[in-house]
Image: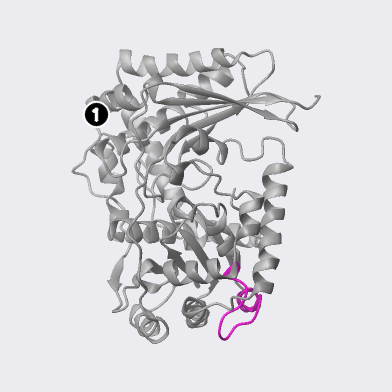
Amino acid sequence: MMKSVFYENLIKYGAWLLLLSIWSCSQQATPTASDTGTATAETSNPAVENSYQIPVDYYTLDNGLKVVLSPDKTAPLVTVAVYYNIGFRIEPKDRTGFAHLFEHMMFQGSENLGKMEFIQLVQKNGGILNGSTRFDFTNYFEIVPAHKLETMLWAEADRMKGLNITQENLTNQQGVVKNEVKVNVLNQPYGGFPWLDMPQYANKNWYNAHNFYGDLEDLDAASLEDVKSFFDTFYSPNNAVVVVVGDFESEQAKAWMQQYFGSIPSGNLPEPANLTEPRQEKEQRFTKDDKLATRPALAFAYHMPERNSPEYYAMGLLDQILLQGNDSRLYQALVQERGYTGSVDGGINAFLGNMFNYNGPMLWMGSLIHDKDVAADSIVNVLDMEIQKLQQEGISQELMELAIVKMRSSLYDQLSQMSGFGRADLLASFALFDNDPARINQLEAEFRKVTPELLQKTIREYLRPTNRTVLLVNPQAKS
């Protein structure tokens, strides 16, 4: 799923990060009852303040660059994350996969750093890095020892100022991305299922429904002029946010931000694309042949409520009740009770992020691989039955509290990921999409506002069969 060529870097340093994460978690304050999974009467009380507040210092440079600083002294590390407000959703038509291709180009050299020297700079200073392309942003981050913060800010500013855009570099990275498509999608059983496939079937608007990994012909067609124009249009400071999380002094970080980023000129941004999707009025079903798959698979998707609406938060809790964890209704019904499959995966913005780091139409999606003697209709019938139970029997206070505890646990897992990157990801998303990174401290309260009545309203409108798309994988390989 949009793994960059630097993904192996993360695997290489995975044990190191795990140890740091364990150490960091051990330094946190003693957990409350709901931290440990014990629901209390306070769990669903909107008046209860979050027990853990993340420091957020947010401001904007004169050139429009958004800056978020979030100090954390639990480990001598810093995470620097640069998010550009451009993802594969709004890449140029007839240039599918272009946003992802450009992500690779950002490592091909800049004014003071030659080809691949950015990567070497991070690694030789004891750090790790990665980049990725998602629906609504392209991001780059480094996790380094704290005393290397200035070096990372200088390096990120250097490539924001301008890339070494050459035909040689473009041709090279076109080949890299094409191979990535072949390895991760074309030559894999269930390649692209369902994270790449489902948006193309469920959505109607081209921006939400095209092959964002890239058709091979489109990747070949990208020209040097395309790359230069894309950089000048979208990789400007007024279309970006820089987030720093970790062990640093805020005033010194601010001085470096001004020193290295302050002189980069603003860009002329185009009018935002129209991403709206029509209301779906009829269930859609599609079948995809897979020459490498040996067992059938099924995915389902429902269009989500508008981001940040009351129903959006209600869907977050319904996701916890229906799909997340071994205690979820669908896991119990499909795996434990009927044995139709060994697992059910999915969620909101599934496989490409989380329910917070996108900005546009989105799907709540689930998927499973099942035996050939299990009919697809049997699986869909179970899905309908479990949703109808929630609608007919109502959602008890006990079930509400359990969902909030699970959501709280999921949120704090996100915040503690990779020694600061999980926190940086949410801060960057809320800065880019809401101009309010402090919203990170309001999420728990928003979920606590959800009532049983709101859950019922959300089920009726968003989990109706006519809002659903079902995608079947027809296996073509011999088992």
Going 37% across and 60% down the picture, which residue do you hit? 427
Neighbour tally class for label 1: few under 14, some 14-19, many 20 plus, Cα within 10 Å? some
| In front of the other: 31 or 468 | 468
Give me the residue at 59% from left, 79% from top. 164
Q: Is residue 453 left or right of residue 250?
A: left
In which quadrant is the C terminus drawn? Answer: top right
Compared with 82, 405 (above or below) is above
Horizontal and vertical percent position of residue 291: 74, 31
Please state the extent of the stretch shown in magenta in the rendering: 105-123
**Residue found at x 29% / y 56%:** 434
On whether residue 110 falls in the magenta region, the answer is yes
Identified by mark 1, the residue type is Leu
Tell me the residue at 32%/13% (across/down). Answer: 393
Q: Left of 339 or right of it: where is 36? A: left
Looking at the image, residue 438 lies above or below residue 469: below
Q: Is residue 290 left or right of residue 94?
A: right
Q: Nearer the viewer, residue 13 or 237?
A: 237
**Residue under numbered circle 1:** 454
Q: What kind of colouring is applied to the model shown?
A: one colour
Q: Which percent across, then down, holds residue 88?
A: 49, 53
Is 162 one of the magenta-colored residues?
no
Q: Position of residue 28 (x, y in %)?
A: 42, 58
